């Protein structure tokens, strides 16, 4: 089998993988990905999960095939080498440094945004290792409204982005996202 395909990128939750199915990743899909890899196609999982969460999901799924690359938290790149995932240090270090520099600048003004959201909505807002502003909205309508409000705030921050998946969101540097990470993998 020959293919003009060079890079296959998949999301993880709800697309490639489902916690509610057995197997979590269909066997036929695993076989097809294996066939593609055998022809030289590179497979990348590109997800919002962090590395630990993704590795747990992959382990529970008991895949018969391994992704060549992982993009986690929508920006960190890991390469499958010698049966383990190692960081793409140059990219990840640059990403972390630029994210942290941006977050240090934005942290002083975030309390005003957070207070405004807390006054109007019931979303959970928190900080994690990847962003000083993360949220879980109660539903998509609430997240839509929060996104609209947050984008007004972001008008003053050209290098800051509201990254969203369903009811989950975080702030991130505009230069580091699923697309730019995949471009780096390519």
Image (cartoon, rainbow, N blue to C red):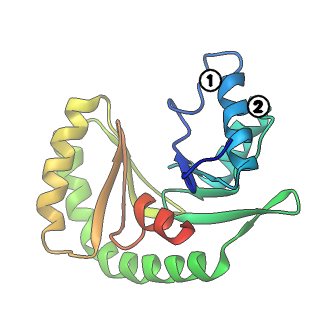
State if disc 2 and disc 1 touch (CB < 8 Å): yes
Residue 82 in the figure: left or right of residue 75:
right
Residue 130 is left or right of residue 139, and the answer is: right
Q: Residue 19 carries which label?
A: 1
Who is closer to the viewer here, 97 or 62?
A: 62
Depicted 113 relative to depicted 159: above or below:
above
Seen as rendered, the residue at the extreme front is 2
Is residue 98 visible in the rendered image? The answer is: yes
Choose between 138 and 174: the one closer to the eye: 174
> For the residue carrying disc 2, how many other residues have a C-alpha within 10 Å: few (<14), some (14-19), or many (20+)?
few
Determine whether, in the image, residue 109 is placed left or right of residue 22.
Answer: left
The location of residue 131, given as percent across then percent down, is: 44, 63
At a point 47% along the width and 67% down the height, the residue shown is 183
Q: What element carries label 2?
A: helix
- Residue furthest to the right in view is 82
Q: Name the residue under label 2.
A: 60
Q: Which of the pair 26/85 is nearer the observer? A: 26
The quarter of the displayed image where residue 120 is located = top left
- The residue lying at 19 percent from left, 56 percent from top is 150
Count of residue discs: 2
**Lower sequence index among marks 1 and 2:** 1
Q: Which of 49 and 185 is in front in this view?
A: 185
At a point 20% along the width and 63% down the height, the residue shown is 112
Label 1 sits on a secondary structure element that is loop
* In this view, 179 is above or below 97: above
At which x and y percent is residue 61?
74, 30
Q: Position of residue 3 (x, y in %)?
A: 59, 48
Does 1 sit above or below residue 181? above
User: Is residue 25 among what the camera can see?
Assistant: no
**Above or below for 106 versus 23:** below
Q: State the CA–CA distance, disc 1 to disc 2.
A: 9 Å
């Amino acid at each position: 089998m020959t293919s003009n395909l060079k890079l296959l990128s998949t999301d993880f939750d709800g697309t490639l993988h489902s916690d509610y199915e057995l197997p979590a990743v269909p066997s036929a899909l695993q076989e097809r990905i294996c066939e593609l890899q055998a022809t030289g196609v590179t497979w990348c999982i590109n997800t919002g999960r962090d590395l630990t969460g993704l590795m747990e999901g992959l382990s529970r799924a008991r895949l018969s095939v391994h992704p060549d690359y992982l993009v986690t938290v929508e920006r960190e790149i890991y390469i499958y080498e010698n049966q383990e995932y190692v960081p793409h240090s140059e990219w990840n270090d640059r990403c972390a440094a630029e994210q942290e520099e941006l977050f240090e600048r934005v942290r002083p003004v975030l309390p005003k945004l957070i207070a405004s959201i807390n006054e109007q909505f019931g979303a959970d807002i928190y900080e994690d290792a990847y962003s000083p502003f993360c949220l879980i909205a109660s539903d998509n309508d609430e997240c839509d409204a929060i996104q609209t409000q947050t984008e007004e705030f972001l008008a003053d921050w050209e290098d800051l982005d509201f990254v969203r998946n369903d009811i989950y969101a975080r702030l991130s540097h505009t230069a580091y996202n699923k697309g730019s990470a995949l471009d780096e993998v390519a």
